[in-house]
Image (tube, rainbow, N blue to C red):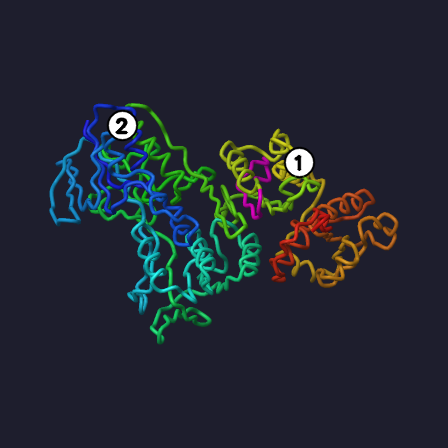
Amino acid sequence: MKVLIVGGVAGGASAAARLRRLDEQAEIIMFERTGHVSYANCGLPYFIGDVITARSALTLQTPESFRSRFAIDVRVHSAVTAIDRAAKTVTVQNLDTGEIYREGYDKLILSPGAQAIRPNLPGIDDPRIFTLRTVEDTYRIKDHLTAHPPRTAVVVGGGFVGLEMAENLVALGAKTTLVEAAPQVLPPIDYDMACEVHAYLRSKGLTLQLGAPVSGFRADGQSLCVSYAGGETAADVVVLAIGVRPDTAIAKAAGLALGAKDSIAVDAHMRTSDPDIYAVGDAVEVKNNVTGAPALIPLAGPANKQGRIAADNLCGRDRVYRGSLGTSVVKLFDMTVAATGLNEKSAAGVAYDKVLNYAASHATYYPGANNLSLKTLFDPATGRILGCQIVGFDGVDKRIDVMAVAVREALTGAELAELELAYAPPFSSAKDPVNMAGFTIENVREGLVRQYHWHEIPAIAKDPNAVFLDVRFDTEFAAGHIPGAINIPLDSLRARIGELSREKTYYVNCHSGLRSYIACRILTGHGFLAYNLSGGHRFYAIVAASAPYDADPTYLCGVKLPGR
């Protein structure tokens, strides 16, 4: 069997290595347009920021190591420009020599990846504007920054690459502005969760211009002026990170069936509309594992798994790809942001409810505890977990991994509550944040607590029968509260319950939602109708009132941790 693989990096390189492990006799040729066949895409911004200092650290496998270890013919600087499905050949151009030739195949695996989007805007060809997708891009940016150390920088785009680049430019000493067309950074999380990220990024010195699509670039003396809706910013260097599109021109020209945004349509075996051609990685359309709808999820983890599955099927091992959750995690300075499954945007048309928890990363009496915000979407009818987003510091990554399994295996809130997770004071609490999400979901589903959310507050305020009740300490209340709220601290509530009227509906809040939940249970037990503010006043203040980020760890009730 002769197998040609177009593209290396994650999907193609994984397919090649797996194929060799399964079939020692197969003839395998891998074509890669760049000079690097297997490299760490996700590490590229950190090389620019001097976190990773050795160029060799970015390379996972070289063409030579692939040849010596796997007996694979690796041809770098080789662009596959056409596929002749009838003749079962591909046309290849050697980018070093210009030579064009044809290569035949029995089976073909396409792993062309995706291209960085570079819009046709005025001034886009200025040599100080860079995109970051390949190792070569990284070296170009690094060499430019070394030769011309930037005092100012603009990053266009607030996704993973854009934010990582912004962080590393700040670390290099550049006054950095991030310009994003959407009203938030990080599309995998919802606006309200992103507001916490916005506040934190500003606290680290990053200037954010949100809801500001870029309209063009122009030279302005020694600087490059970036124009966007609402203003402009001058910079010494600009990095474009506004997203990627599937690189599928040869698949389209060959007549293969396409999916959304000209991605390559594949079945569960990673097979295209041509039974002898498979496709994997960022260029393929997959299934959303929760909804079953088509999706584009350009992440390294899915690409590696798809490459392995394609190789298995080529070797007669019946393997299927069940779909992607889009599980992701990103480091932003010291903060960690992670998501899996559906968010509120992607859940359009799906019945869902949500809970917000504010939980400590580990036992609060053990030094170093920090809090994390955890938003969980679930099916109100069954309690099935549909998605989760977490913003915090320590322990975010391990919680999102648990929640990814929960979404994948359709666990319910009740089953989250029952999970037995590792506990010791330096690592967690006896009631892990994942368990707490499960407890909250079950309380909501069983009617033990009613919720209201930050975005409902303006409408509630117009109801003459509604009363906002703040059960925090009076010092907390004095520092800021929902307009029109009355203050009765939780520990005084039973003694002062005679001050309340059963003719009113009480919308209760505290710092995190914990004390107010207890207050709601007290009020319910005394015949009052009460609702608990999901996420608490701290979340409301960040989202609705643009409160500055407070990195000082607290107990869940809002009291500062001892010694801080």
User: Which numbered circle lies on residue 20?
Assistant: 2
397 sits left or right of 157 in the view: right
Q: Is residue 103 left or right of residue 196?
A: left
Three-letter amino acid code at disc 1? Pro
Q: Picture quarter containing residue 378? A: top right
Q: Which residue is mark 1?
A: 425
Crowd class of label 1 (few under 14; some 14 to 19; many from 20; radius 10 Å): some
Among numbered discs 1 and 2, the one appearing first in the sequence: 2
Tell which of 407 and 98 is nearer to you.
Answer: 98
For residue 159, the mark is none
Q: Nearer the viewer, residue 108 or 342?
A: 108
Pointer 2: residues within 10 angstroms few (<14), some, or many (20+)? Answer: some
Q: Which region shows up in magenta?
A: 379-394
**Where's residue 339, x and y in %?**
51, 44
Q: Please, what is the three-letter code of the amino acid marked with disc 2? A: Arg
Kindly identify the residue that appears in the image at 33 percent across and 62 percent down. Answer: 147
| Element marked by disc 2 | helix
Q: Residue 430 appears at what percent x and percent y?
A: 67, 34
Residue at 36% in and 39% down: 303
